[in-house]
Image: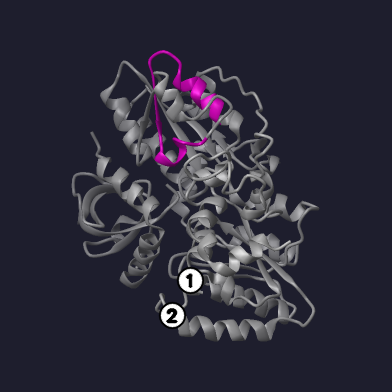
Amino acid sequence: MRFVDEYRDAGQARALSGQMAALCRPGRTYKFMEVCGGHTHTIYKHGLEDYLPDAVTLIHGPGCPVCVIPMGRLDDAIHIAEQPGVIMASFGDMMRVPGGRGSFLDAKARGADIRMVYSPLDALKIARQNPGKRVVFMAIGFETTAPSTAMTVLRAEAEGIHNFSVFCNHVTIIPAIKAILDSPDLHLDGFIGPGHVSAVIGCRPYEFIAHTYGKPLVVTGFEPLDVLRSVYQILTQLAHGRSQVENQYARVVPWNGNPKALNAISRVMELRPYFEWRGLGSISHSALQMTEKYAAYDAERLFHIPGVRVADPKACQCGEVLKGVLKPWECKVFGTACTPETPIGTCMVSSEGACAAYYNFGRFSRQRVKEATSP
Amino acid sequence: MCLGIPGEIAEILPDHPDLAMVDISGVRRAINIGLLDREDLAPGDWVLIHVGFALSKIDEEEAAAALDFLNSIGDPYEDEIAALRESTIDQG
């Protein structure tokens, strides 16, 4: 429990710990999913599981956008990058993700012009400076990055830049949560709702989780105390037989989200009929594509992509980890064949992936290691 | 990429309707503010920035908390800041 004395709110955390224990019904166990990779990070970094009652287990969800991109999509992106006269621009997070034919870094070593950018606006700038090239932005992310991609496309249109397009891999969080709720593998009792995604979409889209599925959801921030308070609030709801959407992070998340951001998305993008998620399979209406109106900015229409589905490596159990069926350390290759230096699966590549977070922080907590090695 | 980074608005650029100069961990960069209400923003305000766009206005206390979180993350945050240093968002 090396974290206890390190962080300033340890006293409050201990008090919450006692209150949470009092809310648990004797003999009952509770499984809550934190959807967002940022929360997973906080949980492992601060050893928050040590503050939770024994009856409460946190399950790590699919909220890492790098982790959920299937290998086939990455192969499609590399195919585009290898076309003559193409410059591919991508966030740094994506560079080391392995596809069926290696990663962006491997493709770059083979001669493809793949550049790391911080913002889609940087990709647009590359297009502006290279009028003779076709610049493609590898768009990934949940609703935190989709508005930025949309705004950049609108900017390209306003400036009359025609050599810029988007390979759109934006995903939406709600259908993924619904798929998990409908999955027979996993019984969950409540959700820790994502923070920054909710700043865009607001809290209303979660209401079906409380109303139709009868599970509490508490939107929360990224500080250790935020996460513990959200668990306390979920347990309080369950103790009183309630299931509601609560916003513990109102200091950043407006109940109705960011209307301008939602409007930007809907001007440029629409829901795909279906999209494959790594580990979760094909989920209907779970991702965004460019609308017909913006076909000229849609790399998927401009380039003939192979669109081949590629199965994950046999040894890799990212799918089970992303669904929350397995804890990172329960994967056969965790920490041995698969490490952040030589990742096999996406959960180990991205710093927000559950495996990388656990590898970097969680495994140093003695109690967790004991759990990991006990049968 | 997924991390929201807090920044303090230094100047709203009068000639560019969607741009502000923002101080982010010691780096001053142009940031797109087109997803917020421009009239709500003034120098000294804090915003949470995702991939070059301000997505939420936050108070100073929340900005400090967000920075704490990011510093606790370590390398990925430094990678993000390094990427931001390379970024040269502008209008032309």
Q: Nearer the viewer, residue A64 or A334?
A: A334
Q: Nearer the viewer, residue A333 or A130?
A: A333
Q: Is residue A95 magenta?
A: yes
Q: CA distance from mark 2 to mark 1?
A: 9 Å
Residue A172 lies, with reference to residue A104, above or below; the image says below
What is the span of residues highlighted in magenta in the rendered image? A74-97
What is the chain identity of the residue bearing mark 2? A
Residue A69 lies, with reference to residue A14, above or below; the image says above
Left or right relative to A121: residue A100:
right
Local secondary structure at mark 1: helix
The picture places residue A347, in percent across and down from the top left corner, at: 56, 46
Mark 2 crowd level (few <14, some 14–19, many ≥20, 10 Å Cα): few
- Residue lying farthest top? A84
Residue B75 lies, with reference to residue A66, above or below; the image says below
Sequence-wise, which precedes: disc 2 or disc 1?
2
The residue under the point 34% across, 18% down is A133
The reply to whether callout 2 and callout 1 are in contact (CB within 8 Å) is yes
Asked if marks 2 and 1 fall on the same chain, the answer is yes
Q: Which mark is residue A224?
A: 1
Disc 2 marks a residue whose amino acid type is Asp
Total residue callouts:
2
Q: Pointer 2: what residue?
A: A9
